[in-house]
Image (tube, helix red, strand yellow):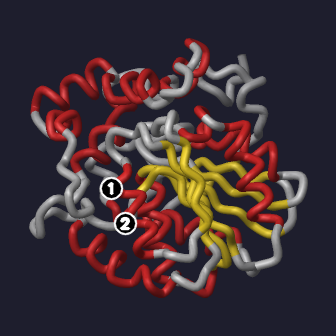
Amino acid sequence: MSQYLPDGVPPALYPFSGKFLALKSGARLHYLDEGSGRPVLMLHGNPSWSFYYRNLVLALRGGNRVIVPDHIGCGLSDKPGDDSYEYTLKSRVDDIEALLDGLDIKEKITLVVHDWGGMIGMACAVRRPERFEKLVVLNTGAFFLPAGKSFPPALRLSRTLLGAVLIRGFNAFARGAAWTGCRRRRMSAELRAAYTAPYSNWNDRIATLRFVEDIPLAPGDRAYPLVLETQEKLGALAALPMLICWGLKDFVFDAHFLEEWKRRFPRAETRVFPDCGHYILEDAAAEVIPLVKDFIARAA
């Protein structure tokens, strides 16, 4: 077993040598930087990590420079306590901007987002729209709950004391996502183990809980102002080519979210997979990866 990887992640499934960026907070941000060519930035969500994009990295790195960070508290990045890192949306956006600035990327970037990665990535993009040339959207959001969409009971439970114990004490959120995230076919035991491997104890599960707690539902929530600002500025990205690939059996990012993306980006190319769930890159890898590769390869 490679010392670089936690137990449960076979090197054959994650055949990369990552790098680390020291942030102002003191935490180290782990990221992949593979291949060369026009840059592609991939942002994961909660409770996954850069492992989610492994097959897409392998497919693209022959012709692109592929950059895939693990958010602080996730994957192979440091997992500091609340005393040394603020687990907020603003911190996440600042971290990605620090990474892009540190890498001194001059070319325009294709942004690929999933789950929380959508909110983080689009917040970055509306701040600096000149940095980006294309958008790939995979079961995610960058706005408040769409009309007609209620907050899922499982997420509401996760924001209670019982939920905190289940998430940090039993890794229920990561395990549950790995079990239910694929609907066309269940993840294998090996894949489920790899998804949950970085979250092996109470301390290492801090981000899994903090992400859920940071979902803004009311104006008093910490992330609310930044989400409001981002959704109001999404129009600045409307001219960019966008590809949407969507699993309809996602219990959070469902058809309500898909329709909101289509309403805001009516020119987007949309591919819907009715039998697939949240982890669309696992459920429909054979279809989605070629679609993304073709979309990125086209002239902007």
Res 177 seen here: yes
Nearer to me, 217 or 249:
249
What type is the residue that disc 2 sits on?
Answer: Glu
- In front: 3, or 172? 172
Foreground: 155 or 84?
Answer: 155
Disc 2 on helix, strand or loop?
helix
Q: Which mark is residue 97?
A: none
Quadrant of the image containing the C terminus: bottom right
- Locate residue 110, reporting x and y percent: 67, 68
Q: Secondary structure at mark 1?
A: helix
Gap in angstroms between the C-alphas marked 2 and 1 = 6 Å
Mark 2 lies on residue: 260
Q: Residue at image x 74%, y 81%? A: 106
Q: Which residue is mark 1?
A: 256
Residue 134 vs 29, above or below: the answer is below
At x 43% / y 21%, what residue is drawn? 179
Q: Position of residue 32 (x, y in %)?
A: 70, 49
The image quadrant of residue 98 is bottom right
Q: Are marks 2 and 1 in contact (CB under 8 Å)?
A: yes
Q: Neighbour class for label 2 at 10 Å: few (<14), some, many (≥20)?
A: some
